[in-house]
Amino acid sequence: MANQDQFLQTIKEGYSFKGETIKIGRAVLDSKPVEGADIFLPLKTFNRHGLIAGATGTGKTKSLQMISEGLSDASVPVLLLDIKGDLSGIAATGTVNDKILERAKLLGIDYKPQAYPVELLTLTKSKPGVHLRATVSEFGPVLLSKILELNDTQAGVVAMIFKYCDDNKLPLLDLKDFIKVLQYISAEGKADIEKSYGKIPTTSTGTILRKVIELQQQGANDFFGEKSFEVEDLMRISDDGRGMISILRVAELQDRPKMFSTFMLQMLAELYATSPEEGDLDKPKLVIFIDEAHLIFKEASKVLLDQIETVIKLIRSKGIGVFFSTQNPMDIPQSVLGQLGMKIQHALRAFTAVDRKAIKQAAENYPETGFYKTEDLITQLGIGEALVTALNEKGIPTPLVHVIMAPPKSRMDILTDAEVTSLTSSSKLVNKYNQEVDNESAYELLNKKIEVAQQRSVEIEQMQQQAKEEKKAASKPEKSWVDNPVVRQAGRTAASILTRSLLGVLGLGGSTRRRKGSLF
């Protein structure tokens, strides 16, 4: 009993915070929840990022859902990257059953099912929801070169293309604009651009074009274009004062890592670039949850990993927190894992020697405790139970604690197609972003320029041909009436008659027949 008193005192001291908090469950000792040992998470340190880990079916997605609800109740907007497609139920009221009521009683909470304000987002035209887009110009030469995995020479060509388009007022809105400029500087505009910006290697433009086409094949045409999504719309508060939960459903992108990398790079860069420095706020401005993050880190390019690491280190000063939900903490690169202050570890399963080694490494990532054998407990946790540690206001890790997690208040299942249609049809953002926009940009402007140049070329050719014909005509002597064939024939006839007449007078003409009286 003394051990339990000490445990209760440790929990109360470790999990009592100033400011707003979210209750996530109750602490467990010797397989029993301890009354009064309620576990809270401080909103103040949610910008220090976090991890929710656990094997399939252990309850990590429901923990993510429950924490998102708590943030929304505290007027904190949330962005969920739903890779499996099973989080849309937050928009619907939960269902009460005996298991939920039993858990609520165990945790000393009054369970009241409710729906939460939700905005469904999509990166493709095939899914209902707010269509997220960004222009090529907004993406910028640096990020575009990174996502295309270009070398320094090729990246220099991309930078020159952006400079050329800026100088000549050629907006780069979608990928067809960028492709058109690539083709133009390799053909009609080659001399023009090389005169102002230097020689362009043909091999570089060819390589860039092939990589852009590869990006198009992964669906990037749906992402690049207008109307650009404004990240401020991720930070909205609903009419009832709760934080809006934006759910980006990206299940179809599991086999298109470049498309997902493109979105992640642009979103993180845009959030960092547009958000002002906030320092330590009482609660975050936005919390991002990336579900099934192991799929991202497994397929992501080195560029994306570097970008995530950089943003994780810097974006917390903007009041933005990023949480990763994955199967094993070892799925997260160590450089990123070291930046995650809050950790919620659900059960891991040890089926092989490799699994046991991974569990041992996972246990070493958590604070030492005299109340549990962490390495053993990780494999013994039940569904909806987790080991929890967070950061207090001073940035010090709280004691590691075994927690029975509270159930979500919203539906623990997905929305039906009819419910999705109803939700999107009433969305203000759908009306704002889903209209097709195709403003005049580099593609149209260069086509006009090429058309004008071709027309001018035809006119010049015609003028040159006309000049040649006039010059040729001018070099010939003028014809007189004497040159007329009729006149020439008449002249020849008259000359013949005159000649015969003269010969006759001289006695040299006439018939060749012998005259009368001739001696011969």
Image (cartoon, grey):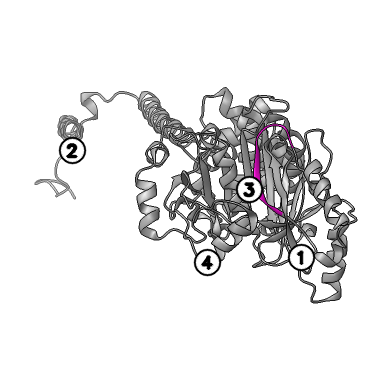
Left or right: 45, with 65 as reference point: right
Three-letter residue code for mark 3? Phe
- Name the image quarter holding residue 434: top left
User: Which residue corresponds to mark 2?
Assistant: 509
Left or right: 49, with 238 as reference point: right
Q: Is residue 474 above or below residue 361?
A: above
User: Which residue corresponds to mark 4?
Assistant: 98
Residue count near mark 1 (Cα–Cα under 10 Å), binned few <14, some 14–19, many ≥20: few
Three-letter residue code for mark 4? Asp
Residue 84 image offset from top left, x and y in percent: 57, 60
Q: Which mark is residue 289?
A: 3
Q: Calculate the distance from the C-alpha at mark 3 to the C-alpha at mark 1.
A: 30 Å
Q: Calculate the distance from the C-alpha at mark 2 to the C-alpha at mark 4.
A: 148 Å
Three-letter residue code for mark 2? Gly
Residue found at x 53% / y 59% = 85
Residue 498 image offset from top left, x and y in percent: 16, 30
Q: Which numbered disc, 1 or 2, marks the residue that appears first in the sequence? A: 1
Which-is-in-front pick, marks 3 and 4?
4
Q: Which numbered disc, 2 or 3, marks the residue that appears first in the sequence? A: 3
Tell me if residue 288 is in the magenta stretch.
Answer: no
Q: Which numbered disc, 3 or 4, marks the residue that appears first in the sequence? A: 4
Q: Secondary structure at mark 2?
A: loop
Q: Secondary structure at mark 3?
A: strand
Q: Is residue 126 above or below residue 437?
A: below
Residue found at x 51% / y 37% = 242
Residue count near mark 2 (Cα–Cα under 10 Å), binned few <14, some 14–19, many ≥20: few
